[in-house]
Amino acid sequence: MTTKIPLRLTTPLASCALLALALIAQAVPAQAQYTAKDWPEGAMKQRFTDTCGACHDINRIRVGYTPQGWLTVVRMMQNFDTPIPAEEWPAMTEYLMKNFPERQRPSAVIVSGPVKARIDLWDVPTQGSRPHDPRAAKDGSIWWTGQLANKLGRIDPKTGAIREYTLKSPHTGPHGLAEDKDGNIWFTGNNLGLIGKLDPKTGITTEYPLPDKSAKDPHTINIAQDGMVWFTVQGGNMIGRLDPTSGDIKLVTSPTDKSRPYGLMINSKGVPYFVEFGAPKIASIDPQTMAIKEYKLPNDGARPRRLAFSDDDTIWYTDFARGMLGRLDLKTGDVKEWQSPSGPKSEPYGIVFTKGALWYNESGAKPNTIVRFDPGTEKFQSWAIPGGGDIVRNMDVTPDGNPVTANSLANQVGLVTVE
């Protein structure tokens, strides 16, 4: 393991339009909702409830953060032009840090094993950027979405050279990432309801607005072997397909209400599969007819968040709610699950298959871990992410087979070199 590169602190950008995006954990259960009178007293109580409560469910704040985590979240809110006067931010930050400390999290369980791996991390230049999805490009570079900075970023791991690209429209909310055969970088505009394409040679962004106003929250994106661009629309409960030659977009609604289509991958035959984070289901979509077929998982409490394909197109998924790694055999419909090393509250998240094994992140463990699972031996091995990690929402694989990460709350991107 390498030592975490020190975080370079800078003066916050002067800017809660979407604090719901910035507050990273899930909402508290319905029975634990709070009203303004329930919040701790303090000089910023009224400003907090009036301003932040105007645009999202402020009960999410009950999850809490470390002081450093709160500094990052505050920068996220500033990046999104939260309407709080500049002179009030210090008092607001103090109110948050004092009254909402980090929730109790399970201690990471580190499992030794035969594989050697090294984790390298790079700080993202823009503070409060909230790197969401990474993408390992064909040229060896690593890209990321700066969701709350309105930027895409690129780093050359060999030299450490970093460049950020500011997107065309303010507050786009870039989320998922994909690269086409020509090297263009496609992304979902989570906040503005669009699909975007960045030409890295020119820095020019082309936008494709979604044709249905109810198609809110475009989420994960991937490109099929025939060039078609596929994406999930979590808030709108839809799956979308974009033809890059014409710009035509088609949308279909998930058969299950409020199923929240989330992670999406395309198998070796060009068939997109996606997980339904709001339901215990995994689904496929026919590339021609766009008919959706769902596979129900055996446990009603399952909440799959990301998926990966092994070499034989078997589906593997992370069950965020139950702390499980799961396998769905599409030929038989059989499901098998394994408890993640750090337990039922470890919140497995981003996942990839590479070098004959599954690699994923435990986003709820402290510190966050990178976990390797060998399907042949059914044994785990894990590593602590230097500096804590703090939420790897998605992962990708470099051309030479090494996992890459984007660490949202730590404002970093990472590379796991399997030695």
Image (cartoon, rainbow, N blue to C red):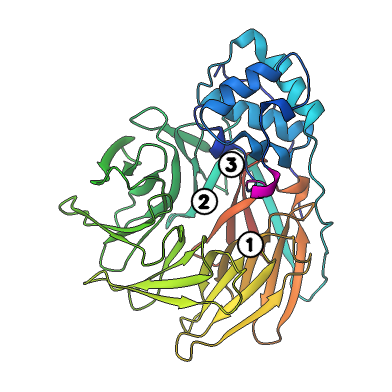
Q: Earlier in the sequence, mark 2 or mark 3?
A: 2
Q: Quadrant of the C terminus?
A: bottom right
Position of 189 with respect to 49 (left or right) is left
Dot 2 corresponds to which residue?
Answer: 134
Q: Residue at x 51, y 32 (%)?
A: 18
Closest to the camera, between mark 2 and mark 3, is 2
The part of the chain drawn in magenta is 27-32
Dot 1 corresponds to which residue?
Answer: 320
- Give percent across and percent down for residue 74: 64, 26
On screen, residue 129 above or below 136: above
On screen, residue 419 above or below 171: below
The CA distance from mark 2 to mark 3 is 16 Å
Dot 3 corresponds to which residue?
Answer: 160
Asked whether the beta carbons under mark 3 and mark 1 sit within 8 Å of each other, the answer is: no
Q: Residue at x 71, y 31 (%)?
A: 70
Label 3: how many residues lie within 10 Å, few (<14), some (14-19) or many (20+)?
few
Closest to the camera, between mark 3 and mark 1, is 1
Position of 360 with respect to 209 (left or right) is right
Which residue in the rendered view is the most extreme toward the top?
A: 87
- Residue 3 visible here: no
The CA distance from mark 2 to mark 1 is 19 Å
Task: Tell me the amino acid under the disc marked 3.
Answer: Gly
- Give percent across and percent down for residue 11: 65, 18
